[in-house]
Image (cartoon, helix red, strand yellow):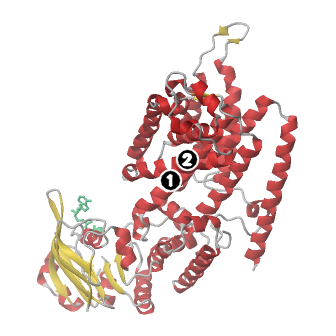
Amino acid sequence: MKNMAKKYRNAILTTVLIAAFFIFLSWTKTHLDAYVMRIFNLCAINTILALSLNLTNGFTGLFSLGTAGFMAIGAYTSALLTMPPGIKTMNFFMQPINPMLLNINVHFFFALLIAGILSALVGFLIGAPVLKLKGDYLAIATLGFGEIISVVFTNTQTITNGALGLKGIPQYTDQYWSWGVAIVIILGLKSLVNSSYGRAFKAIREDEIAAQAMGINLFSHKTLSFTVSAFIAGIGGALLANLNSTIDPTMFRFFFTYQILLMVVLGGMGSITGSVISACIITVLMELLRVVESPMDLGFISLPGISGMRMVVFAILLILVVLFLRHGIMGENEISWDMLLGKESGHRGNFGSQ
Amino acid sequence: MAILEVNKITIKFGGLTAVSDFSLNLNEGEIVGLIGPNGAGKTTAFNAITGIYVPTSGSIMFQGNDITRLLPDKITKLGVARTFQNIRLFENMSVFENVLVGHHLRIKSSFIDATLRTPKYNREEKMMRDQTLELLEKVNLTEYLNEKASSLPYGQQRHLEIARALATRPKLLLLDEPAAGMNPKESEELMKFLKQIRDKFNLTILLIEHHMQVVMGICERILVLDHGITIAEGTPDEVQNNQKVIEAYLGVELDA
Ligand SMILES: Nc1ncnc2c1ncn2[C@@H]1O[C@H](COP(=O)(O)OP(=O)(O)OP(=O)(O)O)[C@@H](O)[C@H]1O
Ligand SMILES: [Mg+2]
């Protein structure tokens, strides 16, 4: 009974928090300038992407690096579904766009959904061969997948406009869309990983042989985790396309995946709250670090701007995290109502909480 | 009727024959021991029965189904559960969750039901939780409910592994050295415990064990492996007095 009461309390608190957050979102509309607003939206999108990677890498123990590839699928899908025909024609001046794609136009909501579904479909299909691999081999194969997508998109001129990319994608992604979707994904993922399926994922992560001995079909559960992760990454990519208004195949290369990986590792593999916190921190840090790529005059010495410097800083950061903060900010723990309010509660394995 | 029929299985690793022409019939409700010196091929035989290895030749039937080539999860679903020589718990999960996972194989709700917490899923989740509590009570692990599995005392970890196996509702339970690392008092308790669960859950048990006290105490029948070959089979008394067995164990005290 106490557990039931606690469940209702938590549900109410969560609802209140979300409502308060939406009031805050409407406040940001009038109080944040365009630049800060963009970063604020990126925080939400990176949160979504970090959660996608955390599902496979953190919760299921699959070392997957395909995020950028799935994002690309989502980004292009949503772009092509939301751009008006006129703009499409203007973009495709080298070779005309495939006539089937010219007049398609759907509401942003459906564009996001279809982006996720297509990405999930690709995830499902490549999962079959790739998920037979373990550990580092899986990492290499998924990394290869991401690069292949980028190459394919460069060469499918009549669909993606190749290396020219797409410009003038309607900027539908505002703070309501980005954070609204992020919240839905946070809640959905929390529910999934705390369900019986989530426990099976964690069992696979802990010990594949024991999980299999418990009657868990490794392949179908890995495929499930991988496909859901691809779905989420596809939606993240779609939100990004409709935020940036410009996309091209080089955007979705390894560096992007690597940045998301840093967020997951820093936040804590297997922690949803960790991913949210660290996605926001790193997104802001990314912007602050732009300084190191611009020319600097330190008075006694002036340094030329070195582009790519941020990547160096990030590589160092990742090394430091792995060396000194292996379990990330949160480890495998979550910030929950029980933890914030409860005395006798808050244990991760608390059997009464769902 | 035999619940398990192992028919002349041979398992080779490259040039090494780990098990050769191993046959075994288990009758329902029996407790049978599998003994033999280190490296005799006992664990390898278990791994073949539970689907981790496919035998090089021979066949394995469980309740009339050919399980020789099935994947481990399929075999578990048919009703064969096991524990491991080097305990393999889900270390970062709680005791409760470890056992809860053992119920997942019977879930009917889809992952979408699970994510949306539909009434169908909630019913199943509640049932799994209730059954887990019940099971933990039966094996006296209730006091550790919320502990991390890896934080349990060694002996309790072995009990937890058995409890987790029971959650899959096996008809046949394979135990790989359940008394390893236990003192005489603990292994005495384990023997009682195994007899208890055999009766409570209508199990057939096959166990590998080095503790002769345990083997002789509860096994109705014993098979002895040496270098992959079955050198003796019979009641504890027969096996104990078998010349080949004594030779195989030369230097190892039989009643240690
Ligand atoms: N995967 C494998 N690859 C190669 N050789 C193996 C493999 N598994 C077991 N062996 C070899 O097979 C033989 C039998 O090993 P097994 O583990 O079955 O012995 P055991 O009877 O369980 O011994 P112990 O009492 O030490 O557990 C050993 O020589 C072992 O080295
Ligand atoms: Mg062994």
- Rendered view: B247 above or below B71: below
C-alpha span from label 1 to label 2: 11 Å
Total numbered labels:
2
- Which of the numbered marks, if any, corresponds to residue A53? 2
Quadrant occupied by the C terminus of chain A: bottom right
In what quadrant does ligand 2 lie? bottom left
Nearer-N-terminus badge (1/2): 2
Could you classify mark 2 by the number of other residues whose Cα lies within 10 Å: few (under 14), some (14-19), or many (20 or more)?
many
Please, what secondary structure does the residue beneath circle 2 have? helix
Please, what secondary structure does the residue beneath circle 1 have? helix
- Work out whether residue A275 or residue A242 is closer to the camera in this orientation and state it: A242
Label 1 is placed on what type of residue?
Thr
Q: Position of residue A22 (x, y in %)?
A: 82, 50
User: Looking at mark 2, is its residue's CB closer than 8 Å to ligand 1?
Assistant: no
- Which of the numbered marks, if any, corresponds to residue A227? 1
Label 2 is placed on what type of residue?
Leu
- The subunit letter for the residue under badge 1 reads A
Q: Position of residue A239 (x, y in %)?
A: 65, 41
Check if mark 1's residue and mark 2's residue have beta carbons within 8 Å. Answer: no
Q: Position of residue A320 (x, y in %)?
A: 57, 36
Q: Position of residue A335 (x, y in %)?
A: 71, 56
Quadrant occupied by the N terminus of chain A: bottom right
- The subunit letter for the residue under badge 2 reads A
Quadrant in which residue B117 is drawn: bottom right
- Rendered view: A277 above or below B1: above
Depth check, mark 1 against mark 2: the one in front is 1
| Left/right of residue B47 with respect to residue B201 in the rendered view | left
Asked if residue B12 can be seen in this view, the reply is yes
Quadrant in which residue A47 is drawn: top right
